[in-house]
Each structure stands twice: as structure tokens, then as C-alpha cells.
């Protein structure tokens, strides 16, 4: 298993599963699952469906709405191994990974809706990515 790193907020809310293939031409929803603390037994966040019909353009961060496949057709993942610890003296220990708790998303103050298909995105960046990957063009001009 590996963590999926959001290119927008750098959060780690999803992880890979047995269907994940790092060398796949395009990643899809069946390759990922919400981490347990964000899923039904945790914060109960909603996310993209875990099926093959969900392609790169719809793989979005559940916190900030940024597309996981920013600039391509593959997500960025990292190993979920425990962080290495450097001990410089018996009294001083440095951890290489900082853990922060991100609260569940608050309702958006402004809706970001695609004028072509009606999809509601969590952020403006998510709407732009949706339009780019779905071929709906840019309607902001």
C-alpha cells in the first residue's frame, strides 16, 4: 500500500489497493480507497467512486478538490512505511515526517458548477480540471 499525495494541499487521504498498477497509462478509481480514518469508520468523508469508470479527470482530493492527476494521467504516491528517525544524540530525535490533522471539509461558500454537464466541484481548481479532462472547454472568459 502507498499513500496518494494531493498535489494541491499535499494531504494524504487515499491509499492504493491491490488493483493499483504504477505503470498503468491512466489511473482510475478502482485503484484507490479512502484511508480508514477518513472513510465510513472514521470521519465518513465522501470521495470519488472506486470503479473503473472514474478516470484521471475525476480523481479529486476530498479535502481541497484538486485533481490527483494534475498535469498527467497518473497520481503521485509514496510508500506508507514508518518514517525513518535520525538520532544525533540519546536526548535528541528528529522525525522526517510531520503529521497534521486536517478537519473535515466545511460546506463551500460558493458553488463551482460546470455549465455543460452540471457537475459540482469542491473548488475552482477542481472545476478547471474537470473542464480540461472532460472537453467542456473554458467558460471563464
Image (cartoon, rainbow, N blue to C red):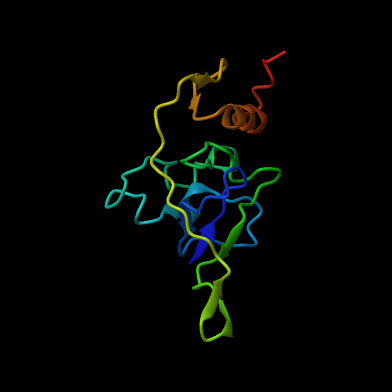
> Left of 129 or right of it: where is 95?
left
> Left of 41 or right of it: where is 107?
right
Question: Residue 28: horizontal and vertical position, in percent?
Answer: 54, 48
At a point 56% along the width and 15% down the height, the residue shown is 115
Q: Residue furthest front?
A: 91
Question: Residue 104: horizontal and vertical position, in percent?
Answer: 38, 40
Question: Residue 96: horizontal and vertical position, in percent?
Answer: 58, 69
Front-most of residues 85 and 32: 85
At a point 53% along the width and 36% down the height, the residue shown is 65
At a point 49% along the width and 73% down the height, the residue shown is 82
Front-most of residues 51 and 76: 76
When the figure is inspected, residue 85 is found, relative to residue 34, above or below; the finding is below
Q: Residue furthest left?
A: 41
> Left of 63 or right of it: where is 104?
left
Q: Which image quarter is the C terminus in? A: top right
* Count of numbered badges drawn on the protein: 0
Question: Residue 129: horizontal and vertical position, in percent?
Answer: 63, 32
Front-most of residues 136 and 61: 61
When the figure is inspected, residue 36 is found, relative to residue 50, above or below; the finding is below
Amino acid at each position: 500500500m502507498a499513500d496518494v499525495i494531493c498535489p494541491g494541499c499535499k494531504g494524504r487521504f487515499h491509499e492504493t489497493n491491490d488493483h493499483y498498477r504504477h505503470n498503468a497509462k491512466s489511473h482510475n478509481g478502482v485503484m484507490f480507497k479512502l484511508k480508514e480514518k477518513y472513510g465510513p469508520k472514521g470521519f465518513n468523508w465522501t470521495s470519488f467512486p472506486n470503479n473503473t469508470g472514474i478516470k484521471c479527470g475525476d480523481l479529486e482530493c476530498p479535502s481541497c478538490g484538486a485533481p490527483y492527476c494534475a498535469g498527467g494521467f497518473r497520481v503521485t504516491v509514496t510508500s506508507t512505511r514508518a518514517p525513518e528517525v535520525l538520532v544525533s544524540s540519546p536526548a535528541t530525535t528528529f522525525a522526517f515526517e510531520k503529521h497534521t490533522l486536517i478537519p473535515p471539509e466545511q460546506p463551500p461558500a460558493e458553488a463551482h458548477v460546470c455549465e455543460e454537464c452540471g457537475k459540482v466541484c469542491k473548488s475552482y481548481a477542481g472545476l478547471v480540471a474537470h473542464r480540461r479532462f472532460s472537453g467542456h472547454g473554458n467558460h471563464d472568459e
